[in-house]
Image: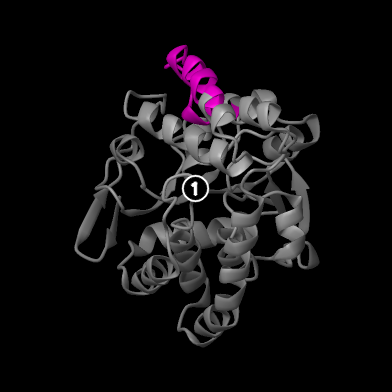
Amino acid sequence: FSFHLGDMLCQIKILRSGVKTHLECIPCFARQALEMARMGTEVESLQKEIARESLKIIIEADFETPPPLLAQKVSSLIRRMTGIADPYAKSKRRQNRFAMELYPEMKEIVRTSRNPFETAARLAIAGNIIDMGIYPGIDHAHAERSIREALDAPILAETLQSFHDAVQSASSILYLADNCGEIVLDRLLVEELPREKVTFAVRGGPILNDATLEDAIETGITEIVVVIDNGDDAPGTWLPQCSDEFRRRFESADVIISKGQGNYETLDGEAGNIFFLLRAKCPVIARAVGCPLGSAVLMKNKK
């Protein structure tokens, strides 16, 4: 099927992409390591030592595993070396505040639209642009532009209808969150779902700017649906490392809504009624999905 975003046409390949770590991931890991080091300490000698140790981990990367697992190792190293549990804490608060300022306007757009479910889905996908792991220099104008563009992007009607029908007929829905800030726009979509059937899952600990339970509380998600963490601090959903409770909910869910690149990288090819909503923000994901860089993606799992 196809998904249009402006003049971009994304042809989604119905093939298992098998997302693994690629050579293009290496400079991204190195940049993130330096960024976390600078957030965690102002001592230049410690920053240099962190850079050296992080590069050792990157050099020994297992290219057969998803990128979030290597990001998890690098982040764990930096937290140990700096003693800072969450180097992104201040940035995450800023992202949440920014998105919460937008929320009333976005909620009104959903409420007054012809198809509130479709509009909310579009805005949730657009929210995936709020990702400091990929765009460390993202500003409000960039995020607002992405959100506005999503409202005008043609979307294949049968794909959206399949998504709508699946969530309406489901007895249980598991919504896998991605980033801070973005979860405020996820809330718009959650509010269009049968909320009594929804469980909203966040990361089990701080990693990059990914959403945790603290962020779900701050943005009001806990007030409208059940929220759990997945028991792991990888920036994705790597089931072998997730908690038993989370895996039980994953396996029993009728529908799984998977937001963002990290969740796609770790869940691509997993069995289940999974709908992936994301922006293809790096060449590796764009190739895996089969679309131009920067495209918005709504696709169903291949299994």
Q: Give SS at disc 1.
A: loop
Q: Who's the residue at 49% across and 19% down the image?
A: 52
- Front residue (pair 55, 284): 55
In this image, 188 relative to 288: left or right? right
Q: How many numbered marks appear?
A: 1
In this image, 252 relative to 166: left or right? right
**In x, y percent, where is residue 276?**
48, 47
For the question of whether residue 172 can be seen, the reply is: no
For residue 70: magenta? yes
Please tell me whether the stretch drawn in magenta is mainly helix, strand or loop: helix
Q: Who's the residue at 54% across and 83% down the image?
A: 105
Vertically, is 276 above or below 220? above
Vertically, is 146 above or below 24? below
Q: Who's the residue at 43% across and 63% down the image?
A: 126
In the current view of this chain or complex, which residue is farthest to the bottom?
112
- Name the residue tied to disc 1: 260
**In x, y percent, where is residue 132?**
49, 50
Q: Amino acid at mark 1?
A: Gly
In this image, 167 relative to 63: left or right? right
In the current view of this chain or complex, which residue is farthest to the top?
60
**In x, y percent, where is residue 59?**
43, 14
For residue 157: magenta? no
Vertically, is 116 above or below 280? below
Q: Who's the residue at 32% across and 74% down the image?
A: 152
**In x, y percent, where is residue 159?**
40, 57
- Front residue (pair 233, 140): 140
In the current view of this chain or complex, which residue is farthest to the left?
7
Colour scheme of this structure image?
A: one colour
Q: Which residues are magenta?
A: 49-72
For the question of whether residue 227 can be seen, the reply is: yes
**Mark 1 burial class by Cα count in 10 Å: few <14, some 14-19, many 20+:** many
